[in-house]
Image: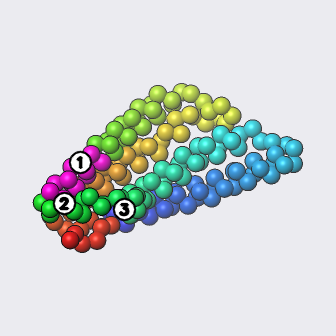
Amino acid sequence: MLRLIDRLIAWFAIPSAVLLLLVVMAGVICRAADHPLSWTDEASGYLMVWSACFGWMSATRKGAHIRIRFFMDRLPSALNRLVRLVFEGALLLLGLVIATKGLHLVQTNLDIEATSMPISAALLYVPLIPAGLVMVMQAVLDAMAIWQEKPALHEGPQS
């Protein structure tokens, strides 16, 4: 199941980044040719949000976000474990807030049309929902690994 989620994230991330590049290139080329396209700035903004959220989800799954563990590594083992569990709980809550607020933003903006494109402004907020849910899922998985005293998928062995 986790491999499927990782593949889905990559399956959406790569085309969104390529599409972002193509839209920005089209905007630059058309401006240079003195025939600017009215929709490229807004479309690139939407695609940037989507690409960033897919990158966020991928980094969350791989444990690639920066972690400064200088002080954590100096704590006694039991306290280190407790602090890590509290940290994962905070990430779980943050993911829930992001997903629920993202859902609220989507519902609020469903009837609002984008400025220069015939699409709903809600599309800008849609990726917050899966990003928050991936964050919740990963926090649960990491907390379970900590509870069972196993290293998380993206962590090395604890000293």
Mark 3 = which residue? 63
Which amino acid type corresponds to the residue marked 3 in the rendered image? Gly
Tag 2–tag 3 contact (CB < 8 Å): no
Q: How far apart are marks 1 and 3 (CA)?
A: 16 Å
Q: Would residue 107 be counted in the magenta stretch?
A: no
Which quarter of the figure is the C terminus placed in?
A: bottom left
Label 2: which secondary element:
loop
Up the image or down, 75 lies above or below 125; here it is below
Kindly identify which residue carries mark 2: 75
Q: What separation in Å lies between label 1 and label 2 (alpha carbons)? A: 19 Å
Residue occupying image coordinates x 77% and y 42% = 37
The quadrant of the picture occupied by the N terminus is bottom left
Say which residue appears at 64% left-offset and 46% top-offset.
44
Range of magenta residues: 79-92
Label 1 close to label 3 by CB (< 8 Å): no
Task: Give x and y (percent) for residue 88.
Answer: 25, 52
Which amino acid type is shown beneath numbered disc 2?
A: Leu
Q: Which residue is drawn at 48% across and 62% down?
A: 10
Element assignment for label 3:
loop
